[in-house]
Image (cartoon, helix red, strand yellow):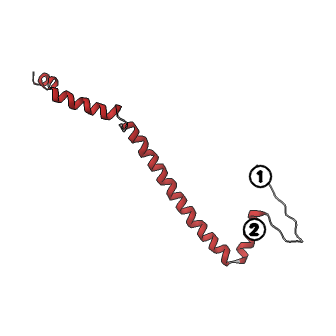
Amino acid sequence: MFLIKIIKNKYFLTIIGIIVWLLFFDKNDVFTQFDLIQKRNKLQKEKEYYISEIENNKVNLSELQTNTKSLETFAREKYLMKRDNEDVFVFVTK
């Protein structure tokens, strides 16, 4: 008897209707919020990755600017540069 009175109460029905509307039909419903949270977490991981890559590149750049031996090694490995009297062989592994 008490449960029937609560269910027939217009305020209770209005509150339930508003809750259902906000959870499922609103522009910012629960599923949209869940997707946005996942995208935010993914972007934060990417940000951390790129920040660490920037730091690594800064260290490598300072090493290349100060050490001529590492500069020569980098040029030989990365850009296949050689001296005048040398031959370069490139081995491609599958």
Q: Which residue is mark 1?
A: 93
**Residue 83 in which image quadrant:** bottom right
Name the spot of residue 36 as percent of width and height, x first. 42, 44
Residue at x 21%, y 29% (from the top left corner): 14
**Viewer-proximal residue, 64 or 86?**
64
**Residue 67 in which image quadrant:** bottom right
Q: Residue furthest front?
A: 27
Q: Residue furthest left?
A: 1
User: Mark 1 and mark 2 in contact (Cβ < 8 Å)?
Assistant: no
The N terminus is located in which quarter?
Answer: top left
Q: In the displayed structure, does residue 90 sit left or right of residue 69?
A: right
Secondary structure found at label 2: helix
**Viewer-proximal residue, 40 or 3?**
40
Secondary structure found at label 1: loop
Q: In the displayed structure, does residue 75 sit left or right of residue 22?
A: right
Residue at x 35%, y 31% (from the top left corner): 25
Residue at x 32%, y 34% (from the top left corner): 23
Amino acid tagged 1:
Thr
Q: CA distance from mark 2 to mark 1?
A: 21 Å
Query: Does 56 sit above or below residue 46?
Result: below
Q: In the displayed structure, does residue 92 sit left or right of residue 20?
A: right
Name the spot of residue 40 as percent of width and height, x first. 44, 49
**Viewer-proximal residue, 79 or 11?**
11
Amino acid tagged 2:
Ala
Tag 2: Cα neighbours inside 10 Å, few (<14), some, or many (≥20)?
Answer: few
Q: Which residue is mark 2?
A: 75
Tag 1: Cα neighbours inside 10 Å, few (<14), some, or many (≥20)?
Answer: few
Query: Does 38 sit above or below residue 11?
Result: below
Name the spot of residue 92 as percent of width and height, x first. 79, 53
Count of labels in the image = 2
